[in-house]
Amino acid sequence: MQGFAERGDSADLGQLQSTMHAIELACTSIQMQMNLGAAEATILSLSQTPQPYQTCKFILENSQVANARFQAAAAIRDAAIREWGFLSSDEKRSMISFCLCFVMQHANSPEGYVQAKVSSVAAQLLKRGWLDFSAAEKEEFFYQVNQAVYGIHGVDVQFAGINFLESLVSEFSPSTSSAMGLPREFHEHCRKSLELDHLKTFYCWARDAALSVTNRIVESDSAIPEVKVCTAALRLMLQILNWEFSPTAVPIGVKIGSDSPKRSECNLVQPGAAWREVLVTSGHIGWLLSLYAALRQKFSCEGYWLDCPIAVSARKLIVQFCSLTGTIFSSDNVQMHEHHLLQLLSGIIQWVDPPDAVSRAIECGKSESEMLDGCRALLSIATVTTPSTFDQLLKSTRSFGTLTLLCVLMSEVIKNLMTKNSEEETWSWEARDILLDTWTALLVPVNRNGGNTSLPPEGKNATASLFALIVQAELKAASASAFKDDDSDYLQASISALDERLSSYALIARTAIEVTVPFLTRLYSERFERLNQGRGIIDPTETLEELYSLLLITGHVIADDGDGETPLIPNAIRFHFPNNLEADMHPIVILCSSIIRFAEESLKPEMRATVFSPRLMEAVIWFLARWSCTYLMSPEESKDSSTILLRFFGQHGQGKFVLDIIVRISLTALVSYPGEKYLQALTCFQLLHALVQQKHICLHLLSLDSWRDLANAFANEKTLFLLNTAHQRSLAQTLVHSASGMRNPEASNQYVRDLMGHMATYLVEISSKPDFKNIAQQPDIILTVSCLLERLRGAASASEPRSQKAIYELGFSVMNPVLVLLEVYKHESAVVYLLLKFVVDWVDGQISYLEAQETAVVVNFCMSLLRLYSSNNIGKISISLSSSLCTEANTEKYKDLRALLQLLSSLCSKDLVDFSSDSTETQGTNISQVVYFGLHIVTPLISLELLKYPKFCFDYFSLLSHLLEVYPETVAQLSNEAFSHVLGTLDFGLHHQDTEVVDMCLRALRALASYHHLEKSAGKVGLGSHAAGRKDPGGNFQEGILSRFLRSVLQLLLFEDYSPDLVSSAADALLPLILCEQNLYQKLGNELIERLANETLKSRLSNALRSLTSANQLSSTIDRKNCQIFRKNLSNFLVDVRGFLRTM
């Protein structure tokens, strides 16, 4: 292999040595933490120097400082990627050859990281030229690599060759590729090409390399160099199996995984039928299992061996083979996949069986890594099989099925956790999580598809025993936590944090539901009896903690989380029990009724004092919320009245009686447990919120005395005014939402008036008091105002067509008080925010329903609000005044501005969704003008520093993009000052680090430019003076916005770093900008051409610029077809010229 050709005159040897010494000194300085700035500048200058290849080659071949060689390799990469466009074909090939040659010649170098860097550079350069090189040129490179990988030049070179392939595969994989400033299409083209033409070949090379050294490794009694070759080959094979293969059709009946969330990673391997010979039918897997088994046997007395690189790599590869699925298995040979899995399982089972012996060995000091990999293998197999297939795999070689093994293994892990009872995570914690994911992968499809028919009787018996052990372990942990300090992990663990694990427990329980439900009922009975017998005699704390745990487990077993939907009764419960079963004999009815009766005891003051602690009430409320969503007056009752569960807890059964109990328990939780915020949050946000989601339940709620008591307490009792204001808001929302159960709209509106009217009246009265300004700052007044605003906001957010009229009247009645409060509390940021959020929610809920006259009233109110807010200079906070504002937490000081942006967005929606009977234009209300006027008021309060905060930045550009896309015709109506400010922020967003923000700005530019082009084509003025340019007060000519942004977009695309995902959006913005400013485009193109000194590059850039606007029959229209053509043209343009333009 020859080194790359030198460019230009031969450099002076003294100059090369001088540069090398400077780089060596810089590297040493960085290592010694001396003169860091100067040292980093020296190294950076090497990468930025035009054509530094000869110098870098000299450093690589002569420097004795490893870090200097590393930096030289990095400089070759940076310069070559940057200058790729004007390197000749010979130079490109010879540069890659030099890197490969260097790696092979220095294969035995002790500085492995330098070798890895040079290997990575070779891989990146090969990818950069992938579309340029012919097949023969690629084969020339790969022939050299193949000779190395096959061991012709020795073990060290063989290792280096495998490492190069590892770097190459990494570069071509989308998730690990290096940025090259090229469109995503380039990377995708390279990925597909490598996968189709070379990936399988590389796998075979790695396999053969491992085979070539296997015998020596097995026969040797000491460490030999071949071990690292075998390890690297196994690692490369694993990397290739982890490749994101192009999708292929899946044969009927083949399971390709579960969409359930997992704590443990499990990547499916779906390479397609072309890989069948290599991976499945060649005996390759048998060799791999035999290799690991032989080494395992040989080093059985060496405890450290299980964690050696070769052992770890071999196990990972075996585990990954368990995930093999898809068309690689012949659809006309269903036994092929099962035979594949059985072969793997036969080798893996010795890692985990017998479970008790494995556990004891780990406790005695053996590494747990093999056992955990065995669990991961079971997870992978479960992910690609059905429960019946999974269970049958082991029965051909053992007296029990795989499900039984899984149960016994899980039981052993649970027993270990019970004995440890440690707050520190141990191997059994990790094993438990992996095995729970295995159960989830197996059972989620069964749970969704219906019943538990897929599990054999033996499997059901095993899962029933396993669930009993799991519950025993959870109860033991709960009991042990009863007297621990409050900082215990168990006490601090919230219900949501336990949810994932409990969901997996529930799946296990449902496989043997006829056993597990009576088991849970028995546990409840025992603990209820223990509480009754020991009242006043025995400390109930342990029992209460056990009940807390049981309620969480039971809630997951009998009901699913709806995730926003109304959850149905789990299929395992729905279809298992016979429909002709009497209600009082139904296990689910017995269990649920006993829990509800127990919960009802909390209504007694003496029981609350001795039994129902706040913590236990949290579990009670959580259980009732989850249970009621599924069983209480289910809408499925009318569709499936034969189901005893639906009838028993339905509208014509015990449903209304249970509903009344739940409401009374809710009121008790809010009134009798002051200061218990988490309990109150569960009650307001989960339980009561769930009750009003269904209209037929609301109908029954409104007829209950307990619901009227709740509404009366909310309106009149001071206790509920002491709730957290967010909880008061939620409670108001729930109570107003229940109005949907009224028989007619007028009754719904009257209910809302009766519930909320006096609160609005009180707000009007207090704000109109002559001395209000004097008393407004009193803490009790601020608290009262805050609570009233939160309650009004809750009511506003519950607006729906039936109650819209009353809620509009509610907001209309407090318009003037809101303005008064905004003036009085202008220095109370918390109150100001509540005011703004109330207005935002009220406008958002009302604007689509308002008639033209009402819309005009609301719009005028909003304008008054915006003017007052602006005049008070609220929000004009300089970040430089306080360093404390630089933290993410203190960005909440700006949330009032975010609320104003949301208000403008809500006003915008009137033009998109309007249910009124007349048009706003009939009253002269132009929403677009209103919104732009609001933007004119708000924008002076928005600084570029403020836009550096992610949440606010996103809200602002989301609104701005929407406005410019929907109302581009009104942009000219803004004053020059406001318009310049808006466009200044747009320019800021165009260079933002968040890709989504940049995308929104590009969409806004596309809308502006497209509007101007279409208007000008129709003979109109378009953006007028804003597009034409103007003179500033100093007499200097300022370019129009389209000219300015044409420069900005071209600058971004050609010279700056950005995500490849933005190329399409940039093309959509650039095309109309070019059409609007064709003369400027020609001028900018000529300037770029003139800046190039190389005539060849000048010609190349000239042709590329011409092709950009003419290739593929591009026309001067902005239709969809033309935009797609321009996207393709721009992609080709960037691949062709971006590299060498960035060297200017």
Image (cartoon, rainbow, N blue to C red):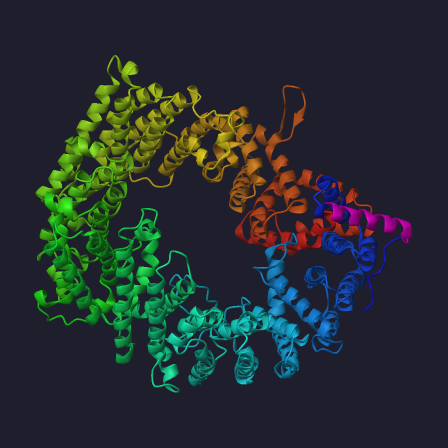
Question: Is 480 left, or right, of 280 in this rendering?
Answer: left
Residue 667, x across and y down, in percent:
16, 42
Q: Residue at x 55, y 38 (%)?
A: 989
Q: Which residues are magenta?
A: 9-29
Residue 113 vs residue 818, the one in the foreground = 113
Q: Residue at x 83, y 55 (%)?
A: 54
Residue 242 vs residue 634, the one in the foreground = 242
Residue 35 vs residue 1127, the one in the foreground = 35
Q: Residue at x 74, y 42 (%)?
A: 41
* 721 to 125, vertically: above or below: above
* 975 to 955, vertically: above or below: above
Q: Residue furthest top?
A: 770
* 140 to 626, vertically: above or below: below
Displayed quadrant of residue 99: bottom right
Residue 605, x across and y down, in percent:
11, 43
Residue 31, x across and y down, in percent:
71, 48
Task: Report whether residue 553 is seen.
Answer: yes
Q: Main secondary structure of the magenta part?
A: helix
Question: Is 203 left, or right, of 913 in this rendering?
Answer: right
Residue 1122 vs residue 566, the one in the foreground = 566
Residue 257, x across and y down, in percent:
41, 69
Task: Please identify the quadrant where the C terminus is shown.
Answer: top right
Task: Please identify the quadrant where the N terminus is shown.
Answer: bottom right
Residue 12 within the segment the image draws in magenta = yes
Task: Report whether residue 1110 is seen.
Answer: no
